[in-house]
Amino acid sequence: MINSQKILFSNELSQQRMAQAQKILGAKVISRIICFALFLLGADRKSISDLLKTPPGSIRSIIRAVFRGGLPAFEDRRRSISTFLPPQERRRLEVTVHIQEEGIIVDWGDTGQIKIPRQNRLQAKVILLTMLNNGLLNTREVAEALDISTAHVLNLARGLHTEDITFLIDKRQGQQQEYRFSPEVKAEVIQQFVLDVVVEGRTSGRLLSEHLQGRCKLSLSERSIRHHVKELGLARIKKSLPPLLAEVKKNFKN
């Protein structure tokens, strides 16, 4: 038990220490600390009220708040962050990207999700590349979602950062692009797509471009191939085609 009657007090030291503490913690915080300390030392509420020139009701509120809320009760309640408690470790936002039949879903778990329709290609690029530039997604995730190479993703991300959304808009004329993809060319794209899925087990704009160049001497850009693969609906059968062919082959043997 502390016997405060045997303690020597210095009014001069008290004023110096109070002034120093108030500069750091503020006058209100110091007043609450003294109030609670006097209460612990056994002072009655009226004496504390007279000493601190604070209404008795406020003394009761301070003591009750400290017992209920702990250290933060000494602080100014208008503060958004406690300076008495150690900072809480911020949880990294976990973001995942799901590619589904109807489009792309960017998922934050319990927080929420963004659904991007499959036909909204530009919207998907803007959202995913913006998240990449802000460290919420990595290059590989964005490349898989957009079905483009990681090098192309990095180029688009830089362009979006420096030149805004206009950098992502395809400025080529659609008729010229369609002219190069005659029915014969489209037939070769479809044929190569099937070959890649069956033989390679996967396909992409880069692979199709390389294989068409080697097999048919067709020089087609990855971007144009991806556009027509999407327009022809081939992306929808990428996963379903191999098991269907295997089933047909099995039935044929039987």
Image: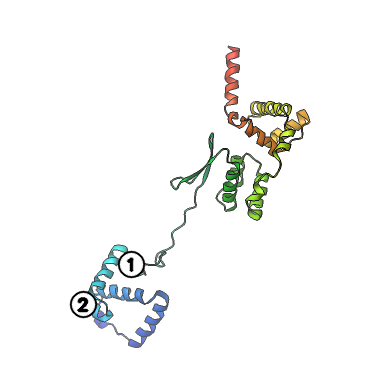
Residue 83 x %, y %: 41, 67
The number of callouts visible is 2
Drawn side of residue 158 relative to residue 46, left or right: right
The image quadrant of residue 210 is top right
Q: Position of residue 74 (x, y in %)?
A: 34, 69
At 24% across and 78% down in the image, what residue appears? 49
- Do we see residue 154 in this rendering? no
User: Residue at 47% of width from left, 53% of height from top?
Assistant: 91
Q: Mark 1: few, some, or many residues within 10 Å (few <14, many ≥20)?
A: many
Residue marked by disc 2 = 46
Where residue 229 sits, quadrant-wise, is top right
Question: In the image, is 92 to the left or to the right of 34?
Answer: right
Q: CA distance from mark 1 to mark 2?
A: 21 Å
Secondary structure at numbered mark 1: helix
For residue 248, above or below residue 194: above
Query: Nearer the N terminus, badge 1 or badge 2?
Result: 2
The residue carrying pointer 2 sits among few (fewer than 14), some (14 to 19) or many (20 or more) residues within 10 Å by Cα, namely some
In the rendering, at what x and y percent does residue 115 appear? Answer: 51, 42
Q: Residue flagged by tag 2: what amino acid is it?
A: Lys
Q: Are marks 1 and 2 in contact (CB under 8 Å)?
A: no
Tag 1 residue: 73
As drawn, the label of residue 62 is: none
Q: Nearer the viewer, residue 236 or 92?
A: 236
- Asked if residue 115 lies left or right of residue 50, the reply is right
Residue 249 picture quarter: top right
The kind of residue tagged 1 is Ala
Which image quadrant: the C terminus? top right
Colouring? rainbow
Residue farthest bottom in this picture: 12
State left or right for residue 177 relative to residue 110: right
**Quadrant of the snapshot with the N terminus:** bottom left
